[in-house]
Amino acid sequence: MSDEKKMNHQNEGGSQEQLSLNDDRRVKVLSPGALVAKRFFRNRLAVVGLVILAVMFVFSFIGGVVSPYKENDVFYRYDYQSKEYAAVTENTSFRYTVADGQEFSGMLQAQFMIAATKNEASFDYKDVTYSIAEEGEDFYLISQGNTVLAIAYKDIVNAEDTSTQLSFDFQRAALKAYTNGEQTFTAGGKEYTVDEMGGVNQAGTPVAYISRFVVQSKVSGVTFTRDFKEQLSEAIEADQEEFTFTNEEGTYDYTLVYDADTRSYSIKQEKETQVFDTYSSPSKEHWLGTDRNGMDMLTRLMYGGRVSLVIGFIVVFISAFLGIVLGGVAGYFGKWVDNLIMRVVDIFYCIPSMPLIIIMGSAMDGMRVDPTMRMFYLMLILGFLGWPSIARMVRGQILSLREQEFMTATEACGISIPRRIFRHLIPNVIPQLIVICTMSLGSTIITEATLSFLGLGVKFPFASWGNIINDVSNSFVLTSYWFVWIPAGICLLLTVLGFNFVGDGLRDAFDPKMKR
């Protein structure tokens, strides 16, 4: 026989032929990588998980690129809203106007209030006697001897022209006439008339008006005319819930709302206003509707998936890097180095991770950390707290590998210690690392989503699946706007489930004892 080994093969006719072991029809031996892949793809759940992850990656990273909207695009709509137009308060306390060149301090005002409550004609303060003269209903004149000091009143004299300052004598004469039901009075050598509504006119020209109601504008730049205040006073006195004001520009409808606590009225007016397109239902423009900020939900989901996945991978990378370095050093050197690193691992296991993260999240809220920097801090914190389990696994594997013959050979060849650890030991731990990192990705995404849901993770304007679901903290949103939180929950569920399926599949594929 030749040096080349031969084997006999009997065909159907009974004849025999010799075939070489190097023939193409020999049994093919798969490489370790191909064998792992073959086992992995035989696992249907693992393949399903891989497909889910592929879809979620395309949705998150490519979907955001092809979407017609950006992450922070805000949409608006026009809607009729009842806005507070003005506030009306009925004056129930005394106000004071001091005569020219006189003083009437807060202590004197307090003494006057006590005397007026007791219906006394005078009061004493610091050995000085002050007289009180009631000149009309809720209208008093305070004097010291023959000198008039001030007037106290509840009905307020308002100038028709807000830039005009009314004199003391005018206010006194007008209030005296109004409170006593007089129709005319004289002040400064001029004669004025007072109508039933408190309007003060001079030669048919409106000069001022008297009212106990104080009207304050709630809209910048808006002032109220005398006609408006008079019609408003009539509506309040008639106990109406609505009133209509008509002037040369048109007719306006207002709603009166009484607040018993503050004893004031709120005037509201419905106006067409541009507002956020909040919680808009799904449509052609917005397939999943809009959120509470008027942003497209589908686009926010895409960008939110990108943030959640990136955070998950970076956190796992940080944890794996620290775990590989510290676990490799502990496993190779052993002795006191191993004891020191393992005690540090034990300390980290004793740290209550979630309370610590919540405290640090609250601290960042208090310091108003920028949302971008907040994401980096979140990744660093989660990564720094997640390395002990990886370090312990790497250390255990290397303790068994360092005693094998190939490590004795590396030592005999004079290979440096870092090269022995990272070029010969760590590669033998890669299968287990891949499995544990894949399984950790799902739990990291869940942790980030939990923190964002609690308001301690990713902050607006950035989106993540966790802070999107945060809207369900409002029971009305939970029951009325399913399109806000259900899609984000489904994306989160599918992604974590996909990572778990792939992790289980890799674990089974790397384990030679598993039969498929």
Image: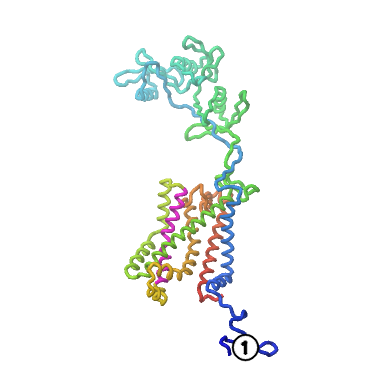
Q: Percent x, y for residue 403?
A: 39, 75
Q: Nearer the viewer, residue 79 or 466?
A: 466
Residue at 35% across / 70% down in the picture? 334
Dividing the picture into quadrants, the one containing residue 235 is top right
The span picked out in magenta is 371-398
Q: Residue at x 59, y 65 (%)?
A: 48
Q: Secondary structure at mark 1?
A: strand
Percent position (x, y) of residue 379? 45, 55
Observer-nearest of 104 and 349: 349
Judging depth in this view, the residue of 195 and 300 nearest the camera is 300
On the question of residue 169 being in view, the answer is yes
Q: Is residue 489 left or right of residue 415?
A: right
Residue 425 screen position, x and y as percent? 42, 70
Is the magenta region chiefly helix, strand or loop?
helix
The residue at 43%/24% (across/down) is: 94
Q: For mark 1, what is the residue?
A: 8
**Residue farthest toward the front in the current orientation of the protein:** 2
Quadrant, the C terminus: bottom right
Measured along the vertical axis of the image, is residue 508 above or below residue 62?
Answer: below
